[in-house]
Amino acid sequence: MTGRQQRADAQRNYERILEVARTVVEEQGTQASLRDIARRAEVGMGTLYRHFPTREALLEALLRQRFDTLAARAEQLEGAGDSHEALRRWLQEFLRGASAYRGLTASMMTTIGDEGSALHASCSAMREAAGRLVKRAQDDGRIRPDVDGMDVFALISAVGWIAEQGPVVAERRDHLFSLVLDGLAAGPVSGRARRAAD
């Protein structure tokens, strides 16, 4: 087998492991069984560890892929006609991903403040792209002026985290999401919030 064939095989294994890992993490959360991932990907544990020496390395690759996808999606939505609808759609996709990747919310919130994290650049790019959606909706008078991108992330992430705590609350996820969006809508700002904004 030539070096080129070996590299092609290694790339296929890498992509296959990531594809299967995405499914298994959606089913089992971020503590998913690595042995189960290797079995379903039809590779040995040695092959999995060559590509991803630790569980953290595999999760980082999954999350980086997710963050990059969300950043690209935010950029696509920047040109949408209705700025509020664009923001709502992006936040909904963000929340759907957070719910599918159980444990994602906690990982993302840790990454936000850790500039040394391998995920920091991807997470920052995603937040900046989403922040532009928030700013555009504010400029159009659709979102209250006393919030910023971090406020929105914290609120939506909180809904994602709460939904992970049990099936009863998970069933209320969409309702909680709507309540947060209603709270972000432009309108009278309370005295306390106004003072904070000033």
Image (cartoon, rainbow, N blue to C red):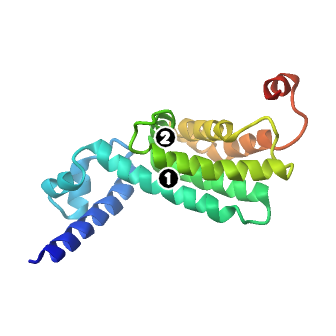
Residue 12 is at least partly visible in this image: yes
The residue identified by callout 2 is: 108
What is the residue that sits farthest to the left in this orientation? 1
Residue at (56, 51) in percent of width and height: 126
Question: Please, is residue 67 above or below residue 195 in the view?
Answer: below
Residue at (27, 47) in percent of width and height: 33
Query: Which quadrant of the figure contains the N terminus?
Result: bottom left
Residue 168 vs residue 112, the one in the foreground? 112
Question: Please, is residue 97 above or below residue 167 in the view?
Answer: below
- The x and y percentages for residue 178 are 73, 46
The residue identified by callout 1 is: 67
Amino acid type of the residue tagged 1 in the rendering: Phe
Residue at (45, 48) in percent of width and height: 101
Amino acid type of the residue tagged 2 in the rendering: Met
- Say whether residue 172 is left or right of residue 188: left
Residue at (80, 29) in percent of width and height: 197
Pointer 1 and pointer 2: residues touching (CB < 8 Å)?
yes
Q: How crowded is mark 2: few (under 14 residues within 10 Å), some or many (20 or more)?
A: some
Residue 33 vs residue 148, the one in the foreground? 148
Query: Which quadrant of the figure contains the C terminus?
Result: top right
Residue 99 is at least partly visible in this image: no
- The x and y percentages for residue 168 are 57, 39
Which SS class for mark 1?
A: helix
- The x and y percentages for residue 196 are 79, 24
- The x and y percentages for residue 21 are 33, 56
Which SS class for mark 2?
A: helix
Label 1 or label 2, whichever comes before in sequence order: 1
- Say whether residue 157 is left or right of residue 47: right
- Say whether residue 143 is left or right of residue 124: right
